[in-house]
Image (cartoon, rainbow, N blue to C red):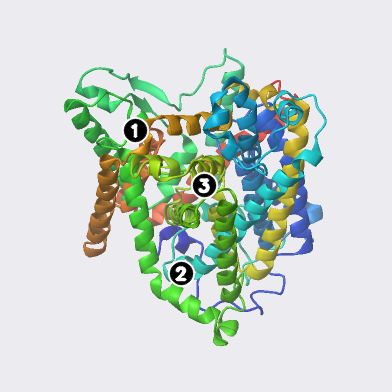
Amino acid sequence: MADPISAMNGTQISPVERRPGSSVDRTGGVTWRAVLVALVALTILTPLAFYVEIIWYQVPDLTSGVPASAPILVLLLLTALMALPPLRRSGLTRRELLTIYSLVLIGGTVISHGMFPLALSRNVAYHYMARTQPLWETLFLDYVPTWFAPSEFEVVDGYFQGAATTPWSAWWVPLGALCLLMILLFTATISLMVLFRRQWITHERLSFPLAQIPLQMVRQSGPDGDARPGSPPLSSLFWLGVIISLCITFNNSLAQRVPSIPTIPLGPIPIIGWQRVGPWAGLGSVELVLWPWMIAIAYLVPRELAFSVWFFWLVRLSLHVIAVLNGATPQLPSEWYGAEFPAPYFQGAGAAFTLLAFVLWVARRHLIHVVRLAFSRAGREVDTYGPLSYRWAVIGFLVSFTGLSYFCWLAGCRPVVGILFMGIMLGYFALMVRLRAEAGLGFLCYPAEIQQLFLGTVGMGVFRRAELVTLISTHWAFQSGTGLSFEALPGTVMDSFKIADSAKINSRRLLVAIVGVLLLALLLSSYVSLTLMYQYGFMGTRRALHYTNFSWQTLNAGSRIANYLSDPAASTTNTGGIIAFLSGGAVAVFLGMMRLRFWWWPFHPLGYIAANPWGAHWHYMPFFVGWALKSLVIRYGGLRLYRVTVPLAIGLIVGDMANVGIWTAVAVVTQGRI
């Protein structure tokens, strides 16, 4: 049975690519004015995001952030403008509005604080922090390539203390190397998405819950499904969801600034405190979390997935209790980073890579077919109307992957280590896209990051110092975040392909626009980040002063390298981590086989993965609420009532984003004082 969310759109997907004709014109919504609007929006958003998220620090990490909320807010604003009488005839069409959304969505990942500003700050911080750590000179600073970041005293000091002129001459080589690395990552991930696009959108027909948000926000009308102009949703439930979510989140944001205003508790609210001794210490603290946007996502995903997320969190807590009973040191479940039993993050990593292997196995016929078509004459005709010909997608992936491996070799890595490192990184990217496409779980962290995975299994002793430096220095590319670091880019690209398929947008022209937007976002972020950092100084930004994940990842990168090199235990093989990794893979295989064999099987392997990264202690409660609400609606109203209430859930997400937009505007008007 087709997913009810996909079915609600009335989308008929053919295994053969649509050709331009009566239903798809030449532009297919990717017009010059649509691209221009997206470019103007990104030009405005780049400095805006830097000021709001870094200098003024008005948007916390756990919200979606300015770049992530911008696509929905831009779409909502433009849709409202198109409803005005002067624009009703010549306004932007539905396809154009969705094109703008897609381009802003993709460009926003580059300008977010978790990508380019973090990548720029990470390596130069070695030389700044080394002033208080003379041992770093002998431990690893000699292994940091000179083209990673400038090392001159005046250049480094100006970056962190501010009140200085940007020394562009000292930054040309490091900036060029960083931009080239990002372009290679762009090429590799986009090529991968092109290769998997038809398999996931057409053959497996994944639901893409996050892509349904813009598709539902702009009403479809007309014989070809393209209203002129784009029309806002008429569902009263959608606007009810927007009002409910906006009122609650706006009130709480206001209460943070005006303490006399009572808050509407959404969490995290401690219910049971952490008992630091005894077996119940394994439970950690029980907190109530009722975030509207996350409850809405849980409502949109399949029931068995939402059920599995909170169920396997309870299983994880049970394992923690058993570990404490058997003498393990009591720790909070979210801080159980080690490879000793139950090693939740290593279990999750094993399940994640097993799922990735299963995804590749399911797609094997498609991938073999793609490779054959890529180097045959028949392939030119078959994939003419896709985003990119299979031939160029395969070539683009091979060339970019070779370039990424060569980058590691230049940084001092052995060829096999560079290939392994980049292969695992791209594998993680593909996994995150799958989680986002099938279950809308794009906000999840990795179960175990690459350096954590190496440290807890084979140990760091098998790596050279230059390889360890390269691994930590490029951590910005694969760090687990809230969907604002590089791992979000492949997911946004695939979401855009899904939107193009559903709205009959010309995917080839869209890909050209995507490449242009990525390059523009890279240039804008380079200029804005360097200019403003030297004006305000890294240590003069509120985000650094609050010691957030952004500042911690920047200032402590060198300390992590030093700790790995000076700790004898970090160099040895860890049998517990290997066992936990293999156990997680075995559980994922069992869950997958049972799900394929028995239709009634209630446990989803993705739920097992979602319960084992950091942050699951906040996710499980909203998923329980979303699952309970959806179960009640379907039980007493059937799928028909569920389809009617889907706009309400989407409205809750949009309302939360609207709150971010309102307070972003307030921060701009007051220059960060409110």
How many numbered callouts? 3
- Dot 3: what SS? helix
Sequence-wise first label, 1 or 3: 1
Q: Quadrant of the N terminus?
A: bottom left
Frontmost residue, 344 versus 103:
344
Quarter of the view holding residue 111: top right
Q: Residue at horizontal 46%, vertical 69%?
A: 199
Measured from the top left, where is residue 408 in percent x and y?
A: 56, 52
Q: Is residue 35 left or right of residue 425?
A: right
The answer to which image quadrant residue 529 occupies is top right
Which one is closest to the eye, mark 1 or mark 3?
Answer: 1
C-alpha gap between disc 2 and disc 1: 44 Å
320 or 217, which lies in front? 320
Kindly identify which residue carries mark 3.
650
Q: Is residue 212 left or right of residue 111?
A: left
The residue tagged 1 is: 569
In the image, what residue type sits under mark 2?
Gln
Are the two marked residues, 3 and 2, in contact with CB atoms closer than 8 angstroms? no
Residue type, mark 1 in image: Ala
Q: Residue at x 36, y 41 (%)?
A: 459
- Quadrant of the image containing the C terminus: top right
- Report the mark closest to the observer, 2 or 1: 1
Rate crowding at label 1 as few (under 14), some (14 to 19) or many (20 or more) other CA atoms within 10 Å: some
Q: Which residue is mark 2?
A: 199
* Location of residue 346 (image quadrant): top left
Mark earlier in primary sequence (2, 1): 2
Q: Residue at x 56, y 47 (%)?
A: 486
Apparent side of residue 513 relative to residue 622 in the rendered image (left or right): right
Give whichever of 314, 632 is nearer the camera.
314
How far apart, in angstroms, are the residues tagged by discs 1 and 3? 49 Å
- Tag nearer the camera, 3 or 2: 2
Element type at marker 2? helix
